[in-house]
Image (tube, grey):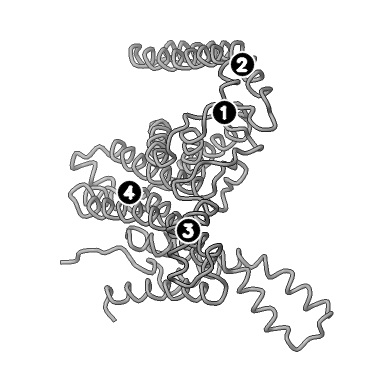
Amino acid sequence: MNGALRNVVYFLIMAGLIVAVGQMQSWNVALSIVNLCLISSIMALGVNIQWGYAGLFNVGVMGFAALGGMAAMLISMPPVKEAWAVAGGGTAIGLLIFVSTAVAAVLVYRKLPKGTLRTTIVMAIVILGYVLLRIFFDPTTNTIEKVNPAASGYLGGFGLPILLSWPVGGLLAGAVAWVVGKITLGLRSDYLAIATLGISEIIVAVLKHEDWLTRGVKNVNGLPRPVPYEINLQKAEWFLSLCERLGVDHVTFSSIFVKLCYSLLFLTVLLLILWLSERALRSPWGRMMRAIRDNEVSANAMGKNITARHLQVFVLGSVVVGIAGAMLTTLDGQLTPSSYQPLRFTFLIWVMVIVGGSGNNWGAVLGGFVIWFFWIEAEPMGIWLMNFITSGMAIDNPLRLHLIESAAHMRLMTMGLILLLALRFSPRGLIPERTQQK
């Protein structure tokens, strides 16, 4: 079987598994898996741009996804007028102090020659700015958080269509990635991983504890949707007429219809990013990035600016992850900072890239589908397996009860098994990177 046919078979098998879930469980479950697989594939593409193109070991995926989620909330939620009325002036002063400090520090860093004097002045500016920010802005945050804390307690957002938050989330993640990259990309790969992981944890900690901005662990619920609400569909004449022609229950089909709308939006974004990624990979820029990845010394000898190119690809990959983070929060309908766990947004995404095929965009997409599918279905499959294994035991047998109760914890074992099998039988991934050999 040639490579192209094998790849088609992989995707057909994946489609068959999703159809099987629709038939055996429900189409609502199947479409929920599809939507999360599409978002996971976009995140995997972002990581593949960084690792597969340039060999950058970024373990801060979680932080950039969280920035995208924050953008979804800030763009779509309406402003809390009461909070702005009592604390708008203090917020403006705090923002002015922050911007002034950053500008002053950058100007001094650029104008003064390298040495102890420059470092001392920059540190003094940063410390002074931090002290002034705490003096003027802390009372403002306390005032904001006291405004109806059960329902709001934060400034709110801009009240714009939530679809605008997807590119904004990408831009916000890209801007932070630029700052992070300027600091960390001169480090060795292992130090880069530690630095990006630490910075992502800082980002999530800010989201959890700055209640005036994101409500912290109280969460922001009820984000507007880019698709219709089920209750509105159930009252629409055209939808009721469609359900009657199809012979389906309008309540059940309304949920399926909404998920299909999400799938169409997510698929459109995935195909656009995939097309752009393929164009970039096959361009002279893509060949240059792979040359840098394979041999930095030779690329540097040819006059390539390694650090600048690494910064460029680091920002591009983070933009894609930020877009996916905004899409995920849109699908959830709420911003939940405590849900940004490294296991979900870093480990799983890396497994997707490794299993799918590092350096191959189609492999990243396939890995996103495979890993997320088994991450969700590991629990029902585990329960079925344990029921089958213990079918000969008594119903109240302690061993049987223990195995069935433990089936829900088979996810991690399943991920480890998939990763081991992939590394053993297909070490370059299910769809390996294409290399041109003369």
Q: Which residue is mark 1?
A: 213
Q: Which residue is mark 2?
A: 140
Q: Type of residue at label 1?
A: Leu
Upstream in the sequence, badge 1 or badge 3?
1
Mark 1 vs mark 4: in front: 1
Which x, y percent locates residue 181? 39, 35
Which x, y percent locates residue 47? 40, 50
Name the secondary structure under disc 4: helix
Tell me whether circle 4 and circle 3 mark residues in contact (CB < 8 Å). Answer: no
Q: Is residue 38 visible?
A: no
Mark 4 vs mark 2: in front: 2
For the residue carrying disc 2, how many other residues have a C-alpha within 10 Å: few (<14), some (14-19), or many (20+)? many
Q: Disc 1 and disc 3: Cα gap in Å?
A: 30 Å
Residue located at (59% from left, 69% from top): 378
Q: Disc 2 and disc 3: Cα gap in Å?
A: 41 Å
Q: Type of residue at label 4?
A: Ala
Name the secondary structure under disc 1: helix
Residue located at (37% from left, 57% from top): 267
Q: Which mark is residue 259?
A: 3
Q: Is residue 179 visible?
A: yes
Q: Type of residue at label 3?
A: Lys
Mark 1 vs mark 3: in front: 3
